[in-house]
Image (tube, rainbow, N blue to C red):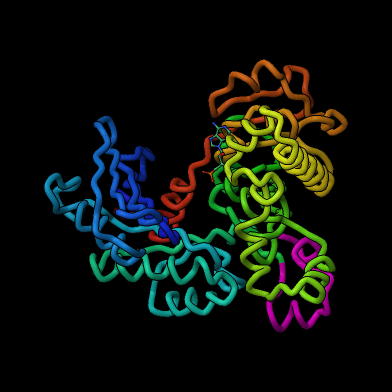
C-alpha cells in the first residue's frame, strides 16, 4: 500500500510516496514557486535527483503538476496511478472539530474552509491542494491530517486563556498548538529508542519553534497557542510578547492590526532582534564575528527556550527525556548546549562531546544524566502515512 503525502504550503508543495508497511520512501520532491521561475525537483530513492523549471505559480497548479509528472512526463515515476492507494494531506488547523485525522468528504472540505478565519495563511492553501488532487485523480481516497490534532488532549487548565469566558466558549479562543505531526512522530520515536520514557519534553526548533509536554504518549501542554505566533522566539516570529505592549503600539505608535500581523510574523524573532537574518546559521556566524545584536538574538532565543523547557518540566513533574528536532534542533549543537545550560537542576545533563559530533537519531546526555537527551530527525510525512492508513484501514 503506497501513500502519497502532500504538504501544500504558500510557496511550495512537498510530496513523497511512502510504502506504508515498510515506511520506505520510494521518492520525494517538491514544486517551489516562491522564487521565479518555479522549480520542480524529485529524488527517487537510490537514484540521482532530477530538477526542472516549471510554469507554476500557485498551489493548485503545483499539485496538478506533481500528479501529472508521477504517471506522465518524460520519465514517469509510476507505471499506473493505481499504485497509489491514498493521498494524505497536512492541514494546519483542525479547530475544535477535528481532533483526529479524517477522510476527506464534501463536509470535511467545508469544515476546513470554515476554519480559514483561524488560519488564513494555511487552511485555504491546504484546501486548494486537496481540491487539486481530487480533480486530477478523482476517486483516490484522501485523508486530512491536522497539525493541531496532537494537542487536542490538552487539559482545560492548559488550553484556556484567562480572558472573559465567553471568548473561550463563544469564539473558540483557546490554545490549539501546532507542529503536531512532528511532535507526534518524535513522541513515538522517543518511545521506540528508549523503551520507557513516560515524561517527554519535545523541542521542535525550525523556522517555527514550539515545545510540547507529553505524558504516556499524550500531549498535556504546548507553547504555541491560538496561533503559531505564541511561545518561543522563532526565525521571524516574535513568540509571546506582553499583550499590553501590543495595545501600546496600536494606541501610541501609529501601527494598525495589519502592521502588527506583518511585523510580529515576518519582521521579528531572530531577524528582528539581530537585524541580520531569520536563518540561525547566519545569525550565529554574525555573532561569532562580533555583531552584538546577533549575539543578543541568540541569547534571547536560548533564554526563552530554557525557560519554556522548565515550564514544561514542571507541568510533567519531571523529565525522562528531552528531545530536540527540526532544522535547528537537529543541527545546532550551540543551541542545544545553550538550551540545556542550567537544566542540571532537572536532572538533564548534556555530554558536550556527544552533542558536538551527533548524527540523529542520537542520545547526547551524559551517561549519568537522570534524563536522556535525544536528537531526532523529524518525519512529519510518516505521521501522515500512519494516520492515513489508520483512517482508511489496512486494505490497500
Ligand atoms: P526548518 O524549518 O526545520 O527547515 O529549520 C530551519 C532552521 O534550521 C533555520 O533557522 C536554519 O538556520 C536552521 N538550520 C538548518 N541547518 C542548520 C545547521 N546545520 N546549523 C544550524 N542551524 C541550521
- Quadrant of the image where one finds ligand 1: top right
Residue 198 seen: no
Looking at the image, which residue is at 75% across and 36% down?
292
Question: Is 62 displayed left or right of 108 in the figure?
Answer: left
Looking at the image, which residue is at 30% across and 68% down?
132
Q: Is residue 90 above or below residue 139?
A: above
Closer-to-camera residue (242/295): 295
Farthest residue to the right: give it.
Answer: 345
Looking at the image, which residue is at 47% across and 77% down?
113
The part of the image, by quadrant, that contains residue 370 is top right
The part of the image, by quadrant, that contains residue 10 is bottom left
Looking at the image, which residue is at 88% across and 31% down?
345
Closer-to-camera residue (200/67): 67
Q: Is residue 247 above or below residue 36?
A: below
Q: Is residue 190 above or below residue 74?
A: above
- Magenta part of the chain: 154-174
Whether 162 is among the magenta residues is yes
Whether 39 is among the magenta residues is no
Q: Is residue 340 above or below residue 85?
A: above
Question: Is 395 displayed left or right of 308 in the figure?
Answer: left
Picture coordinates of residue 97 (x, y %)?
57, 73
| Circle count | 0
Picture coordinates of residue 205 (x, y %)?
62, 43
Picture coordinates of residue 222 (x, y %)?
71, 54
Amino acid at each position: 500500500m503506497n501513500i502519497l503525502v502532500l504538504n501544500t504550503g504558500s510557496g511550495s508543495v512537498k510530496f513523497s510516496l511512502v510504502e506504508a508497511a515498510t515506511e520506505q520512501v520510494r521518492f520525494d520532491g517538491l514544486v517551489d514557486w516562491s522564487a521565479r521561475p518555479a522549480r520542480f525537483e524529485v529524488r527517487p530513492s537510490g537514484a540521482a535527483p532530477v530538477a526542472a523549471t516549471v510554469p507554476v505559480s500557485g498551489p493548485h497548479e503545483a499539485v496538478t503538476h506533481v500528479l501529472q509528472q508521477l504517471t506522465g512526463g518524460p520519465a514517469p515515476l509510476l507505471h499506473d496511478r493505481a499504485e497509489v492507494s491514498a493521498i494524505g494531506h497536512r492541514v494546519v488547523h483542525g479547530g475544535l472539530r477535528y481532533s483526529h485525522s479524517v477522510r476527506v468528504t464534501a463536509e470535511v472540505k467545508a469544515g476546513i474552509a470554515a476554519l480559514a478565519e483561524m488560519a488564513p495563511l494555511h487552511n485555504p492553501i491546504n484546501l486548494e491542494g486537496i481540491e487539486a488532487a481530487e480533480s486530477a485523480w478523482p476517486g483516490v481516497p484522501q485523508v486530512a491530517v491536522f497539525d493541531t490534532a496532537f494537542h487536542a488532549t490538552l487539559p482545560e487548565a492548559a488550553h484556556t486563556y484567562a480572558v472573559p469566558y465567553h471568548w473561550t466558549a463563544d469564539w473558540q479562543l483557546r490554545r490549539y498548538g501546532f507542529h503536531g505531526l512532528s511532535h507526534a512522530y518524535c513522541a513515538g520515536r522517543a518511545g521506540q529508542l528508549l523503551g520507557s520514557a513516560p515524561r517527554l519534553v519535545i523541542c521542535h526548533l525550525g523556522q517555527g519553534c514550539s515545545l510540547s509536554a507529553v505524558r504516556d504518549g499524550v500531549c498535556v501542554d504546548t507553547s504555541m497557542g491560538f496561533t503559531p505566533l505564541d511561545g518561543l522566539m522563532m526565525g521571524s516570529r516574535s513568540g509571546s510578547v506582553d499583550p499590553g505592549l501590543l495595545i501600546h503600539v496600536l494606541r501610541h505608535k501609529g501601527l494598525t492590526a495589519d502592521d502588527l500581523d506583518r511585523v510580529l510574523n515576518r519582521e521579528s524573532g531572530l531577524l528582528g532582534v539581530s537585524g541580520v537574518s531569520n536563518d540561525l546559521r547566519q545569525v550565529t556566524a554574525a555573532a561569532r564575528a562580533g555583531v552584538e545584536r546577533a549575539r543578543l538574538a541568540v541569547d534571547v532565543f536560548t533564554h526563552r527556550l530554557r525557560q519554556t523547557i522548565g515550564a514544561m518540566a514542571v507541568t510533567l513533574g519531571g523529565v525522562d527525556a528531552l528531545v530536540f528536532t527540526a532544522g535547528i534542533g537537529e543541527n545546532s549543537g550551540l543551541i542545544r548546549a545553550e538550551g540545556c545550560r542550567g537544566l542540571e537542576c532537572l536532572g538533564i545533563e548534556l555530554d558536550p562531546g556527544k552533542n558536538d559530533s551527533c548524527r540523529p537519531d542520537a542520545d547526547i546526555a551524559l551517561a549519568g544524566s537522570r534524563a536522556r537527551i535525544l536528537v531526532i530527525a523529524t518525519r512529519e510525512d510518516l505521521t501522515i502515512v500512519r494516520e492515513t492508513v489508520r483512517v482508511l484501514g489496512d486494505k490497500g
